[in-house]
Image (cartoon, rainbow, N blue to C red):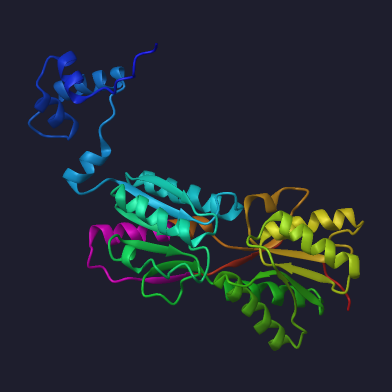
Amino acid sequence: MESAKKRVTIKDVARVVGVSYATVSRALSGSPEISEETRQRIDAICREMGYMPNSIARAMVMRRSQIIGLIMPSINNFFMSELADCIETRLRRAGYDLMVCNTSYEPRLERQAFELLIGRQADGIIFLPSGVESYKGLEAYFAQVPVVILGENLRETPDSYVSVDNTRGTRIGVEYLYELGHRRILYLGNRKGSMTHGLRAEGYRQACRELGLDADMLDSPFERSSVDAGYTLAREYFCENLRHSAIFCASDSLAIGVMKAADEAGLRIPEDFSLMGFDNISFSALPRIDLTTINQPEREMAEAGVDMLLERLRVPETEKKHRLIEPDLVIRSSCRKVEE
């Protein structure tokens, strides 16, 4: 029978190095009392033995864990996964580790994630809410740990947040399609229950009113703005007939699904209709996709959110801030000029 594996402790390291437990502890904490030669020798033995410090115990003593939590609705969402990568890169440069919690768009799992991260002594939390109901029941957690919100879902809360100006983004998109000659523009994939989608839809409606266009919308019954959701919505739409010269999708993922349905229906983009997305995920630039889209600058959002949180950690009295980041249009080959 295999014996139980034993975790290496500071005492084990001290025994091998031939120094006291206290000397190893001081060396690992960066105490100036320990010479550089001794510190390097202890570090080398720690690596050789595979010693890992007890981060929870250290956090309790230091009152800092150097861990930031990220609570997000879906790690499978292209934009969110790219955003998480940017957040981790920024935190690593600042000397922090990232702990990611995936909530699958369930408020119950959002609460569990807050409990887990607070229990693990996370120094702060970056929160991407799943919907407008997310804030209910979370007030007690927000009072215990610094939180910065990324996205629009909790825009009316008094807490710090960073978001792209979603309303401005869809206005830019409609105005560009109008300049190309499009007068029948379908907005596809609006999800009710998401403030992000609500604000994007409002920007579309505002632009249509100002330009004298009909605001034709095809709402999505799906929980997530996925490729499959876009494919299903577009397939149903194409079965009726193609009544619009342009389709503006609420996200790039939906737009890629529309491309798949169009290919099956024998429709060409942009010859039969122009297609636009929102987010500018990395896949949208691939040669066979080459999607015109509204850029949601995830790196700028991530860095602004991380910097806002770190500022609150350095100066707890810092006022909570709200920041809207301006989106911009990325022109590729999925839209063309038409004569209506």
Q: Residue furthest top?
A: 1
Which of the pair 291/59 is nearer the observer? 59
User: Residue 186 at what x, y percent from top left?
Assistant: 77, 74
User: Residue 291 at what x, y percent from top left?
Assistant: 73, 58
Q: How many marks?
A: 0
Q: Does residue 322 lie above or below 257 as drawn?
A: below
User: Which residue is located at x 73 percent, y 55 percent?
Assistant: 228
In the image, the segment drawn in magenta is 303-324
**Residue 196 can be seen, yes or no:** yes
User: Residue 73 at what x, y percent from top left?
Assistant: 52, 57
**Residue 334 can be seen, yes or no:** no
Judge whether residue 205 is colored magenta.
no
User: Residue 176 at what x, y percent from top left?
Assistant: 72, 73
Q: Residue furthest front?
A: 1
Q: Does residue 21 lie above or below 209 as drawn?
A: above
Instruction: Say which quadrant the C terminus sits in.
Output: bottom right
Q: Is residue 82 left or right of residue 247?
A: left
User: Which residue is located at x 88 percent, y 74 percent?
Assistant: 243
Residue 105 is drawn in which quadrant?
bottom right
User: Which residue is located at x 35 percent, y 54 percent?
Assistant: 115
User: Which residue is located at x 64 percent, y 76 percent?
Assistant: 201
Q: Is residue 307 left or right of residue 214?
A: left
Q: Does residue 168 lie above or below 266 as drawn?
A: below
Residue 258 is drawn in which quadrant?
bottom right
Judge whether residue 315 is colored magenta.
yes
